């Protein structure tokens, strides 16, 4: 069971799928937070820490409403599906869970624009719905965010500096209890100059390092500087990026990678399938 020790632990450390229905039954109490509502904003992957694993699959469906050389306006329809206790040893055998644990659909509007030749901006607003099949609870979800993606350095490495800020919240549709948080993450994803051709694709090994900060409402308003100095998490990882997605749309992957971070004394591993920052 994940306790609310800090925003970082509460959101990342396998809180993606919420405190499970099993834990709620054992304690006889409703979970204080329903973190699976935020799974779409934390990325696809298999998250693991000591004795726990959770799998999240995000399907980023979108429809172009307007597109030109410098900007793009899209209707977002991202689906997120979560599975409780998905084990690492199931992955090599392509074993899939027997049942879906959680589901979210967060429609919204997303706008991309090229601010400079090297700087791309992204902004979005979502209003959606989530369901936990373990305890049959339903939540409403709202989120806003903005990102910068800056290309720099040698073309052979194609480094990308990404900074994202977003805020997300949910409210239980039955109990009216809810929670919210804001996130700031920034980091660099870079190639190693070791690209190669395989399976009719160009593949490129890449590495990344990123800092993550998570704030509750009080910290964001009153303790932002202190939170930036203390409540931070460093994540590092390596991946293999593909020049063309693998899979059948919309369930495709752009890359395959693994990352590591250490949160409040626990090792957290993440297997990811898209840009990790």
Image (tube, grey):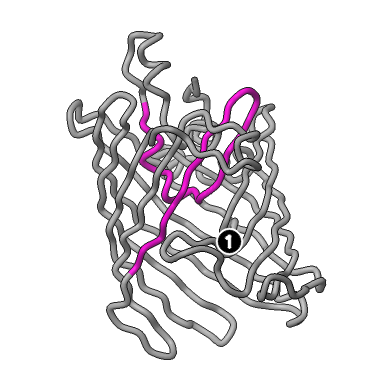
How many badges with numbers are in the image? 1
Q: Which residue is found at the position 78% from the left and 74% from the top? A: 196
Q: Residue at x 65, y 34 (%)?
A: 89
Is 46 colored magenta in this rendering? yes
Q: Residue at x 40, y 59 (%)?
A: 145
Using the image as rendered, state which of residue 190 and residue 232 is in the foreground: 190
- Front-lying residue, 224 or 80: 80
Q: Residue at x 32, y 72 (%)?
A: 74
Q: Which residue is mark 1?
A: 275
Quadrant of residue 51 in the image?
top right
Using the image, determine if residue 181 lies above or below residue 146.
above
In the picture as drawn, the residue positioned furthest to the left comes out as 174
Q: Position of residue 198 (x, y in %)?
A: 73, 71
From the top left corner, tell me how far across and down residue 120 is, in percent: 51, 77
Q: Is residue 27 above or below residue 98?
A: above
Q: Quadrant of residue 179?
A: top left
Classify 274 as above or below 266.
below
The quadrant the C terminus occupies is bottom right
Relative placement, left or right, of 272 versus 68 is right
Secondary structure at badge 1 equals loop
Q: Position of residue 239 (x, y in %)?
A: 70, 58
The residue at the far bottom in this view is 69
Residue 65 in the image, given as x and y percentages of width and height:
28, 78
- Magenta region, residue range: 33-62
10 Å neighbourhood of mark 1: few (<14), some, or many (≥20)?
some
Q: Any magenta on residue 252?
A: no
Q: Is residue 185 left or right of residue 153?
A: left
């Amino acid at each position: 069971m994940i306790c609310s020790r800090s925003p970082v632990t509460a959101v990342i450390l396998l809180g993606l799928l919420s405190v499970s229905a099993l834990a709620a039954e054992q304690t006889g109490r409703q979970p204080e937070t329903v973190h699976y509502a935020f799974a779409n904003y934390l990325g696809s992957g298999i998250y693991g820490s000591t004795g726990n694993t959770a799998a999240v699959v995000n399907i980023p469906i979108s429809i172009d409403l307007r597109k030109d050389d410098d900007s793009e306006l899209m209707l977002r329809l991202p689906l997120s599906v979560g599975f409780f206790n998905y084990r690492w040893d199931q992955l090599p055998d392509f074993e899939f869970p027997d049942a879906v644990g959680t589901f979210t659909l967060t429609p919204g509007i997303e706008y991309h624009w090229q601010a400079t030749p090297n700087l791309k901006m992204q902004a979005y607003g979502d209003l959606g719905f989530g369901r936990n099949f373990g305890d049959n609870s339903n939540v409403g979800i709202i989120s806003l965010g903005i990102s910068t993606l800056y290309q720099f350095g040698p073309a052979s490495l194609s480094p990308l500096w990404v900074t994202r800020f977003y805020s997300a919240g949910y409210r239980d549709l039955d109990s009216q209890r809810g929670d919210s948080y804001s996130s700031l993450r920034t980091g660099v994803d870079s190639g190693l100059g070791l690209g190669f051709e395989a399976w009719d694709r160009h593949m490129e090994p890449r590495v990344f390092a990123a800092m993550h900060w998570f704030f509750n409402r009080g910290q964001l308003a009153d303790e932002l500087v202190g939170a930036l100095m203390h409540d931070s998490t460093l994540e590092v990882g390596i991946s293999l990026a593909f020049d063309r997605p693998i899979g059948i749309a919309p369930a495709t992957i752009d890359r395959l990678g693994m990352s590591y971070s250490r949160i409040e004394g626990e090792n957290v591993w993440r297997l990811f399938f898209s840009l990790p920052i």
